[in-house]
Amino acid sequence: MKKYLKFLTGRLATFIFLFLIQIAVVFWLVITIANGNALYFYLIYVFSFVIVFFVVSRDDNPAFKIAWIIVILTVPVLGVPFYVIFGNKRGGRQVARQVVKYRGYYEHGLNLALPQPQSEVFADLTANSPILARQAAYIRNLSGGALWRNTEVEYYALGELAFKRIQEEVTKAKRFILLEYFIIDEGEMWDAMLNLLISKVKEGVTVRLMYDDLGSIQTLPPHYESRLREAGLLVGIFNYMRPHLNPRLNYRDHRKILVIDGDVGFTGGINFADEYINRKIKFGHWKDTVVMLRGEAVWNLTSMFLQQWMFTTSELVDFSGFLPQRRFLTDGFVQPFGDSPLDDENIAENAYIQIINNARKYVWITTPYLIIDTQMSTALIIAAQSGVDVRIITPSFPDKWYIHPVTRSNYRVLLRAGVRIFEYTPGFIHAKMFVSDDEVSIVGTTNMDYRSFYLHFECGVAFYHSSMVGSVRNDITRTLEVCKEITLAQEESIPFHYRFCRDVLKLFSPLM
């Protein structure tokens, strides 16, 4: 009862209520205008076909287009305005201005005197592996994420282990701390972190904290940012939730970035909430992973944060005050990168597909959601049919009841092709990882779903010929020991009506 009361009195409930009122007003206006006017309904249907031709002509994912076509033709009275508001990802003039603003801040960072990797770094990777160099070139050319050496890497197989290391490194901060997270939740984890940040502010360290408003709307009290600012933190709230029918609501900051003095950086799956370190049990044991970078490659994380910070707060920042100052030993090639929904490029998904297409021996994957499009499904199927050992680990305990059936709806077609699928029996696996052929790995924030691939700001780190590749492979090997393998016979024995419900949810998954 206390939980529901908190929800009903919170900002999210208010947002939903006002949002539904606007939808009801739109519906009422349409019905009122059409009442007794058959011509209007004919015009609506004609216009819906025009919109469908527009949808078909767009360079969007086919599954995304099919879902909207069904909605528009089935319920044109609401489907047409809803597509105009939410389906057209260009979003009109307001979103266009946001795109220009975002690119302007990116250009601002590029035009400053910033560190650039030596040309021989890319040449060395090319000499070692032309295929991996091609993948690194794709990431660099599309995201601007440079390829680095002179970087030490550490891997943490659980959120609680990573958090202990995070606290140790934050304690050492002398100049600045940058934090960018999707969820912040008051509790043991965040309280400990906040106390540490406040103590560093008192020592003269500048702390910039940025979090996504939707991600934290149910976990933080109203006006929480004021309390943080009073404590001396600089705060940015990404895409503040306002109950307007606006496509910008879809764009969320799902990144997890922590940078300390420009020399140490963390990223991975964990947010600042107690379930991520298993202090609160919500969906069984929470399995998550984090990587720590120390050295030159941290600069990519720093510049990603600063660009997002300027976009969110409109504060023009001099990047040169955030340069790394320490040197570290080399552990392979390291390439942090970001992915934005504003550039019409699916960088993270395409980087994953490149790993799958280039695999010769194996591709192992962990993901909390397996809601994939035709391109990803085809790549996985072809790899498995070519003799590559393709394994995917998903959760056994879902965090969203309506998403898990969609994940499982993809099992049968993959199993038939020879992909092996495992579910993490202790609970919920939130780690997002790819590893292949003991040569390449990506660890980051990008789920294998439409929202991460198309609508979220995401980040990740690609590792080539690094010890991180072995660390990820070994952790997945250990994780497989506590997973149950899903067989084709099990999937084909599922009752038809249940499979049908799954497929219906799958059909509309691009809109979720």
Image (cartoon, helix red, strand yellow):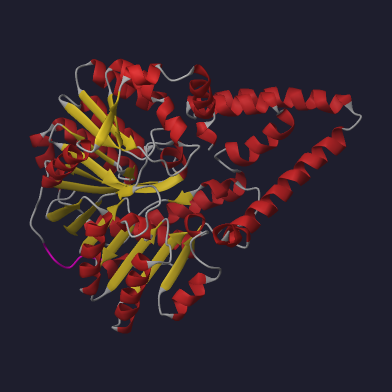
Visible residue check, residue 180: yes
- Closer to us: 161 or 346: 161
- Closer to us: 214 or 352: 214
Which residue extends farthest front? Answer: 1
Visible residue check, residue 114: no
Residue 150 image position (x, y, % from top left): 11, 55
Asked whether, in this view, residue 498 is left or right of residue 74, the answer is: left
Tell me, yes or no, whether the highlighted magenta stretch contains residue 64.
no
In magenta, the rendered stretch is 323-327
Question: Which residue: 58% across, 36% down?
Answer: 87
Residue 228 image position (x, y, % from top left): 45, 74
Question: Which residue: 51% across, 75% down?
Answer: 226
Question: In which image quadrant can residue 125 be found?
Answer: top left
Above-or-below relation of 411 to 313 = above
Above-or-below relation of 212 to 186 = above
Residue 76 image position (x, y, % from top left): 71, 28
Question: Which residue: 68% across, 53% down?
Answer: 17
